[in-house]
Image: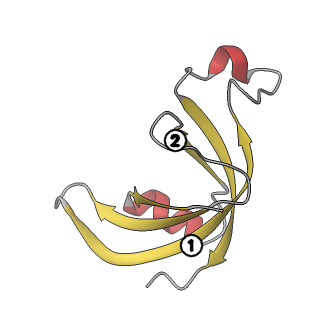
Amino acid sequence: MTTHVVKSWPHLYEQILAGRKKHEIRKISDRDYRTGDEILLQEYDQEAGCFTGRQTLVRITYVTSNEYPCALSGGALGQDYCILSIELVSGDGH
């Protein structure tokens, strides 16, 4: 299992923390995302150009990609991208 550390913009971070957003679209060529890996999401304010200090941990429950496609992902996803199904592991936001 790997823990990936990535940026998350505030409006997306809040939805994940609230349990409403249960997926991430990420560039798979940057990292070798696998089911069971964890992602440490660090909230990043793109307007201010800095991290807010808030972070939360999610677990990857499924990876949809061109390698592991669904009915549409072979044509809908670019070769370098994947959809990660995620569940909240630590939701304190700090």
Instruction: Identify the residue position indicated by label 2 in the image.
Output: 26
Nearer-the-camera pick, 70 or 13: 70
The residue at 66%/76% (across/down) is 89
Left or right, 70 with respect to 81, comes to right
What amino acid does circle 1 point to? Leu
Q: x%, y% of residue 67?
A: 71, 26
Name the residue tied to disc 1.
57
Q: In which quarter of the image is residue 73?
A: top right
Give the structural element (helix, strand or loop) at label 2.
strand
Return the x and y of residue 34 as percentages of the image width and height.
Answer: 68, 49
Q: Where residue 64 sits in the image (x, y, percent)? A: 72, 36
Q: Is label 1 in a helix, a strand or a loop?
A: strand
Which residue is at a point 55% across and 21% down the rendered structure image? 78
Distance in Å between CA atoms under marks 1 and 2: 16 Å
Q: Position of residue 42 (x, y in %)?
A: 40, 67
- Left or right relative to 1: residue 56: left
Colour scheme of the rendered structure? secondary structure
Please tell me which of labels 1 and 2 falls first in the chain.
Answer: 2
